[in-house]
Image (cartoon, rainbow, N blue to C red):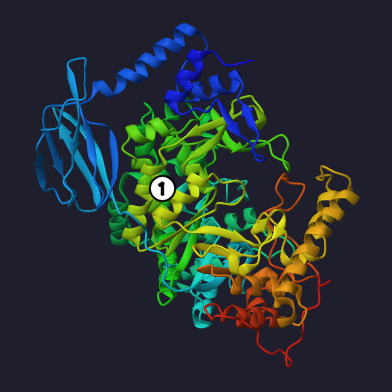
Amino acid sequence: MPLPDDLTALADALGVATSYEDWSGRPVEVSARAVVGALEALGVDATTPAARAEALAAHEAAPWQRAVPHGTVVRQGEPAVLALRGERLRLVLEDRTALDVAVDAPVLEERDGRSLREVPLPDDLPLGWHRVESDGDEGVLVVAPARIPVPEDRAWGWMVQLYALRSAGSWAVGDYADLRTVVARTAADGGGVVLANPLHAETPVLPLNPSPYSPSSRRFRSPLWLRVEDVPEHAAAPAALQQQVAALRPPTDPERVERDPAWTAKLAALELLWPLHRVDALAAFRAERGAPLEGFALFCALAEEHGVPWQEWPEDLRRPDGAGVPGARARCADRIAFWCWVQLLVDEQLQAVAAASSEMAVGVVHDLAVGVDAGGADAWALQDALALRTTVGAPPDSFNQQGQDWGLPPWRPDRLRELGWAPYRELVQGVLRHAGGVRIDHVMGLFRLWWVPAGGSAADGTYVAYDADAMLGVLALEAVRAGAVVVGEDLGTVEDRVRTALDATGVLGSAVLWFETEDDAPVEPARWRRATMASVTTHDLPTAAGFLADEHVRVRDALGQLGVPLEEEQERVRAERAALLAMLERTGLLAECDGDAALAMHAALVASPSLLVLAALGDAVGDLRQPNLPGTVDEYPNWRLPVAGPDGHGLPLEELLAHPGVARLTALLRSVGSQHARPPATTDQPRRREGQT
């Protein structure tokens, strides 16, 4: 049944899709329930004609209530205008320089006693976060660079799941010192980049969520990865206290990464060291990081008292400005200081990781998850900017016929604009701190997100649009200021406008061997896009050895995750593998790698023009198991697997880095940038056979 015209008009005005094209290009009409649900999540009642008329009138009247917009983003060097509904205009730049701008543009429209003009802005405005003032109203003016510089030369490196890299010195989980080791080794081998899984902060109460893509906060980093012995307070501690700390170290499970015992031990160690904290260093850090840090630390303290989610806290604590918060802040002052100190330690250890990458072309690229846990720190602190009555996901496609619900609340596009993009700015600044770059998971979310209504299934959702120009502008400004590269995860069905805008902004795309196809046939590497970060696989896909051995088929069948009969899936996968191997043979890459299919897959990356080339350490040693199996939670040990050899036994980091497979793959990757890459002779090294066909 067609949607009512007034509902369609209201949805169009607020960026809620009433139709879309599915993965196959087929037009799909969105249900009235989905549209009304998305509008409700935006704070709009669309249940009756009268309510829709009132909402549309309010939306159209809103811009006329202010002399200047809440937030405007323009690109440096491009003609720009400001929508002014006042009689005068002043710009106050970041450096506090004030500029009066002539208001001599023609009146375009009049309403409610105001006149709309599009006032040209000076064409020499510096980059930055500026303020516009008119008739008592203020707004934010962001002047962003036209483009983020991309690397001039190609670079190679490793993509790592930090928790899986456990050394002799780590406490049951990989840590920042282990990341520093990998970065230093990569730099010494001539590599230019290391991609780390999201290191976002979790809520520090048990049980910890193992998924790095459902964090408590994306603005702050996890203390779970701290190396306790590297904390300055540990070095200053007397020997007896150091012995107490050492006694807390948990045993390492060689088959699984267990976060809860590791965090319990580290928290106890940090509490022992807290009385020795550096007062002046902590005070300076708190002053630098300001209100966001104080709010995050308060959340951690309250979560210790009341658990999670925060929606179940006493009512007067459920908002950062709740009536009970001042009292809680005073009562928890010491614990707030403790959690601020913990973040100082995290910051110092990440700074050490960055220092180890100082000679690399790019450095450490940090992964940015698409959202946060609805019951976590960012959702509590930034709830006015989030649509907490909905979650994001993906519409139905050929693989997920019911669609996907990721359980994460999205930004409200209207509130981001009203808040002058401040929450988004904090997020980008946080992830780029001590980083050489950022990889944005599901980068299409800067343009539109699939909203799943409360109480509905993923198939009941619809798309909601975002101001991509503004979000890309803020991203570009912060990336340029941080000297960072930006990579967007643009896999799957991507609208042409998305890739055009990303290319224009200097955001690199993603090239994954499995997905570089045309008419279901593998595309030869020479035809891949240059402005990409290339890899054989991702954390959600089979490893190279697993793909060659049908491990992903076996596991999904054993868990009842196949949507088709086993024989049909085996036939499909084998046909896919045969086509890939045929391409590798046709291009000569398989022969150049002495028939080693896994190595030839990586040779394809080297032979491509992709600017950044990444390999997984697990692929170097024949690991059969992928880090995450989409569609499962506890049925599969998602995010809990250490890097292992083909026998499934976890490899300590020292043994991993000394493995002949790592040496051989490193030698291949070193040829990135040469016109035609060939792997070195390996007659003096054992040849890896596992998973070959």
Quick check: can you spot residue 243? no
- Position in image of residue 278 (x %, y %): 34, 62
Where is mark 1, residue-wise?
427
Q: Is residue 624 above or below residue 70?
A: below
Please identify the quadrant where the C terminus is shown. Answer: bottom right
Mark 1 residue crowding within 10 angstroms, few (<14) / some (14–19) / many (20+):
some
Quick check: can you spot residue 545? yes
Query: Which picture quadrant has residue 471?
Result: top left
All told, the count of numbered labels is 1
- Position in image of residue 406 (x %, y %): 61, 39
Closer to the camera, 28 or 388?
A: 28
Q: Is residue 528 above or below residue 413?
A: below
Query: Which picture quadrant has residue 243?
Result: bottom right
- Position in image of residue 412 (x %, y %): 44, 32
Q: Tell which residue pokes out farthest to the right in this image.
A: 567
Q: Is residue 568 above or below residue 448?
A: below
Q: Tell which residue pokes out farthest to the bottom in this image.
A: 684
The residue at 59%/18% (across/down) is 32
Closer to the camera, 400 or 418?
A: 400
Q: Tell which residue pokes out farthest to the top in this image.
A: 50
In the image: residue 34, left or right of residue 232: right
The residue at 59%/26% (across/down) is 453
Q: Is residue 7 above or below residue 500?
A: above
- Position in image of residue 398 (x %, y %): 73, 41
The residue at 41%/61% (across/down) is 347
Q: Secondary structure at mark 1?
A: helix
The kind of residue on which mark 1 rests is: Leu
